[in-house]
Image (cartoon, rainbow, N blue to C red):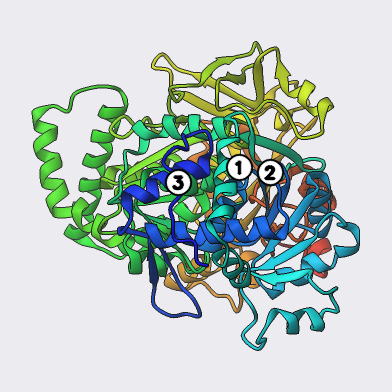
Amino acid sequence: MLVDRKISDSITDRNIAAVFFARAKQLDHLNCVEYKEKKEPYRSMNWREFSKLVQQIALGLMTLGLKAGEKAAIFSSTTHYWVAADLATISNGAISVPVYPTSSANDIDFIINNSQAKVLFVQNESLLKRALAVRDSIPTVQKIVLFFLPADVKSVDELAVKYNLPNGLLADIESVRKLGASLDTAHLKILEDRMKSTPKDGIATIIYTSGTTGVPKGVPLTHGNIMAVIEDMKPVLSEDERAVYLSYLPLSHIFERICGEFYWLTHGGVCAFAESIEMMGRNMIEVEPTTILVVPRVLDRIYAKVKSGIDGATGRKRKLIDWGLDVGAEVVECHGEGKKVGPLLWVKHQIADKLVLEKLRQRIGPNLRIIVSGGAPATKEVLTFFNAVGINTLEGYGLTETSAPTNVNRIGQVKIGTVGPAVDSVHQKLAEDGEILVKGPTIFKGYYNNPEATAEAFEGEWFKTGDIGTIDADGYLKITDRKKDLIINSAGKNIAPQRVEAVLKTVPFVTQAVVFGDKQKHLVALITLDEQAACDFARERNWDFDSYFDLSRSTALLGFLKKELQARSRDLADYEQVKRFAILANELSVEAGELTATLKIKRNVVGRNYKSLIDQMYSSHDPVAAEHENRELAALAK
């Protein structure tokens, strides 16, 4: 019998899934989800259809034996099935455990064993192979549920035979859904009871921090944590059922999970799922979102594409564009400082918007109203540009342990270079050494099965973020560095590498930058470049080169980069300025262990992998010839 009855109205907001079902009942026939399959045009589901999908998967999981308090891990890239599996798990009073699709075998093993996951959702055959590689060491997993079957496989049984899996271990999401759809109303009553019995301080999810050092740590977040931060975000994003979100960042990360998934599910609107992060630009054109979440690398790519068009303008047209952007930036600065825009500036801004800024907004995204940037520091140049154009670009700050945002800039009150004031429920102060301490209902209570790490993370009731910052007179927070990353040079000067690296990343073509200099007289850096952009730039200037490798060793490019770096380092103290840098032939990667799953740089691993090169930058001889044969680096500049 098909269960077509909605979840009872009597369930309150004690369970985040119950909040979703209540919202779905209100929005009913309005569009909820847009997604693609097999390169076809976008398909859609309304709120009634999507909530029915979630309900049926939840009932299917119940029948498969998932109980309240047990864990289901999700090993997948971002897709609408990720969200459905998450909500179906939480509906059962169970706990969802995200696993990054880029996770190493060791991390997959650790997360599943540490959480004791009973069910493992897997996106496709490619990730299934990686999960099966550690199958013998994850005995708690009793059921693997596949989101997408391979095109050449007719049934899940055929796939199970292919990988010699025990009978009943492997299922697909459609069979789980059908199982749930076949149940009677008595089972739906059990599901309702599970949601009713879930307390606000019950765990909804355990998110494992990727960690720049050591093994991952599980961060349990309660329904109350999540609901509190969603309330905090209401006055910040102010979106409603007319909003269109584009989801492409990993749902395994707290940023997309809270500000994307849970904010959308509790406030309404349409969530369009990108085919991949690489296809995000094309998908933006197709769905015309009103809101996107970005990490700085994505924002930089959008900026670079728009900027290349601006740079192609000449004469009066280029002067007009530059004037319009300058006017827009002046207005943003006024708002950030709490000043009124004077009548003359207001008139100039109206003209600039008509002649320049409106056209740039149309090019970036005709309906795009809000961009939220998080996960890492964005550059002032890029943030200023988007806000000057008239797209509210809000930089924020938060950690997995804080249920994401503790701070975020507000629309019309953006102060470039800061991550904004604290959200309403969070209390914040600085320790004597400048470390940011926070407390409030969004803060987790301690690491999962890790009392030692928990004890180290708190100072009384205050959570120690591990980040160093300053708070200005208006309450706006500025992050200066990670406490553990501080460099102490040979003169005893404390240097915040993130501040220096932020300057390096404003140099044309630089995509990644890592600074070193502990116990040394001066700083050195490893950088990577945007190969295509650098080659295009060189061809425009008729530089002589046969390949990117040749170009990256050319005196013309090295001289250009050195000149740009010097010009952009004027605000740094002499001891903060990079004296030598090396261009790496390849970008730092997750596979090499140099980046976390969230693409944060593991400074200690990079330092270890390139120790010989870093040592040579401090030596008196030129290391280029010594490194030429193994091509470890593209070039080094002194």
Checking the image for residue 194, the label placed there is 1
Q: Looking at the image, which residue sits at the far right?
A: 136
- Pointer 3 residue: 20
Q: Earlier in the sequence, mark 3 or mark 1?
A: 3
- Pointer 2 residue: 68
Choose between 443 and 325: the one closer to the eye: 443
Marks 1 and 2: in contact by CB < 8 Å? yes
Q: Is residue 8 left or right of residue 366?
A: right
Q: Residue at x 45, y 52 (%)?
A: 299
Q: Earlier in the sequence, mark 2 or mark 1?
A: 2
Q: Calculate the distance from the C-alpha at mark 2 to the C-alpha at mark 3.
A: 18 Å
Q: Earlier in the sequence, mark 2 or mark 3?
A: 3
Tell me which amino acid carries mark 2: Ala
Quarter occupied by residue 488: top right
Q: Residue at x 34, y 52 (%)?
A: 269
Neighbour tally class for label 3: few under 14, some 14-19, many 20 plus, Cα within 10 Å: many
